[in-house]
Image (cartoon, grey):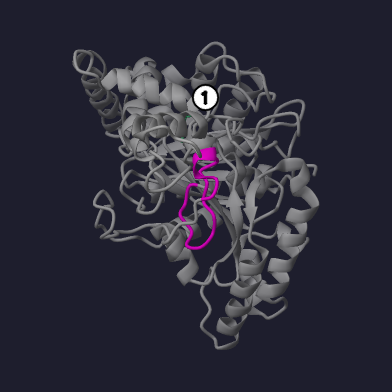
Amino acid sequence: MELFDLTIHELHDRLKKKEVSAVEATRAMLARIEATDGRVNAFITVTPEEALAAAAEADQRIARGEMDILTGIPVALKDIFLTRGVRTTCASKILANFIPPYDATSWLRLKERGAVLVGKLNQDEFAMGSSSESSAFGPTRNPWNLECIPGGSSGGSAAAIAARQATATLGTDTGGSIRQPAAHCGCVGLKPTYGRVSRYGVIAYASSLDQVGPVTRDVRDAAIMLGAVAGHDPLDSTSVDRPVPDYTKSLTNDVKGLKIGLPSEYFIEGLDPDVQQAMDRAIETYRGLGAEFVDISLPHTDYAVACYYLIATAEASSNLARYDGVRFGHRVSDPTGLMDMYCRSRAEGFGSEVKRRIMLGTYALSSGYYDAYYLKAQKVRTLIMGDFLKAFETVDVILTPVTPTPAFRIGEKVGDPLQMYLSDIFTIPTNLAGTCGISVPAGLSRDGRPIGLQLVGRPFGEEEIIRAAHAFEQATTWHQQKAPL
Ligand code: GLN
């Protein structure tokens, strides 16, 4: 095993035994990025100097005996997290030269424990997309098959794990953006309950849906990363003040008697046969481990995608109003007046998908249409939330596919936004309900593209989904398979 192949807990053990230094681990990771990222394009910015300085500091901490599980671990962040002094673009031309003056809370929490930042990761522009093709910095490719998309919007966060270019990464999930790319790249991706992790310093897309979470090589690493970033933050009023459990205590490898719900609405005709087969196999695996299955219904599932695209675009149109060329961001060089400056700076700075969302959202919020669209969508959202709460009266977790198909080809859906939007059909309802979900590797398609299994939990039920995901992982070998890169 190379240093860049290791999980957080494996690298931690080696650092602790002083078999390797943080500087050596970081050098190995930077060399791996150098050797592979020309093909993958998972990174927008690589930060070798900062990384080596942070690694040297981590080595001093280790020498002083002040070691934490994250000390000296090379991590990378989706380029939506503000990083003080390090360019943060959100994969948009409008922020191409933005250097933030402060750190996102989630990143600060990793940094304070000695994690080493190796770079900022590619994504869909402003996290709007499912394929990472809408980046102003070119598409990211799937390390399992370079002709395919890695998923999105946190495509770089998942591709970097699959390509072994970082030990762990953070992404954000508004409608599936952690779980869907994790599934397509054969990684573990966890979207925590809304309010579990601070959003302070994370560039806002749809504020009532956005949530920060880890993408990792295994479930133990996801538990470690979640424990590090979760918890109340006075700087984000939507972060919930509730104790953070030690999530690694949930890695019990015991699911006997666990009640798993199978929602009929998610096992639909048109599901890719390889995905269906992976789900059937997973159900058998869980049965063998002593879990019980219960057929359930989430009757409002059909409305989720439409509801999401009204709420997410409405919130986006409001959040993106701040990019006006005045305080920060791209500004045209030759404005003829204030209005011209606003209009042309935004026209030049935003890509076409972002513009589409702003227009859809502005329309949904406009007077006369607000009640028919935005308000109605909020009501439907409450019904979707109710479906989940009702289901959790009888089951502990819900099992579904993450995506209807394995990763599609680059370019295949760019001309058809509706098809693109439908790739999140199984992940969006979790965000609308505000609850948590995890994606775990559950198979490979006949031609070698990863398939993910989703476990959805109760609000603040992260311990249960981690326990269930871990037991599955330990009973299978999918997480040990490596992208042929
Ligand atoms: N693909 C969905 C969208 O475009 C979800 C994106 C996300 O979760 N950030 O909005």
Kindly state the secondary structure of the residue where label 1 is placed. helix
- The residue closer to the viewer here, 128 or 391, is 128
- Amino acid at dot 1: Ser
Horizontal relation, residue 216 to residue 274: left or right: left
- Residue to which mark 1 is pinned: 352
Q: Residue at x 41, y 34 (%)?
A: 341
Instruction: Note whether 98 is above or below 50 in the view shown.
Output: above
Label 1, residues with CA under 10 Å away: few <14, some 14-19, many ≥20: few
Does the magenta run of residues contain 384? no
Q: Residue at x 66, y 71 (%)?
A: 52
Toward the top, the furthest residue is 269
Q: Taking the image as drawn, is residue 101 in sight? A: yes
Counting from the top left corner in percent of width and height, residue 313 is at: 37, 26
Number of labels in the image equals: 1
Counting from the top left corner in percent of width and height, residue 312 is at: 36, 29
Does the magenta run of residues contain 81? yes
Toward the bottom, the furthest residue is 64
- Magenta residues span 80-97
On the rendered image, what quadrant is the N terminus found in? bottom right
The picture quadrant where one finds residue 276 is: top right
Q: Taking the image as drawn, is residue 296 in sight? A: no
Horizontal relation, residue 259 to residue 74: left or right: left
Q: Residue at x 77, y 55 (%)?
A: 34
Instruction: Note whether 330 is above or below 196 in the view shown.
Output: above
Q: Residue at x 41, y 49 (%)?
A: 202
Horizontal relation, residue 309 to residue 332: left or right: left
Counting from the top left corner in percent of width and height, residue 372 is at: 22, 13
Counting from the top left corner in percent of width and height, residue 35 is at: 80, 53
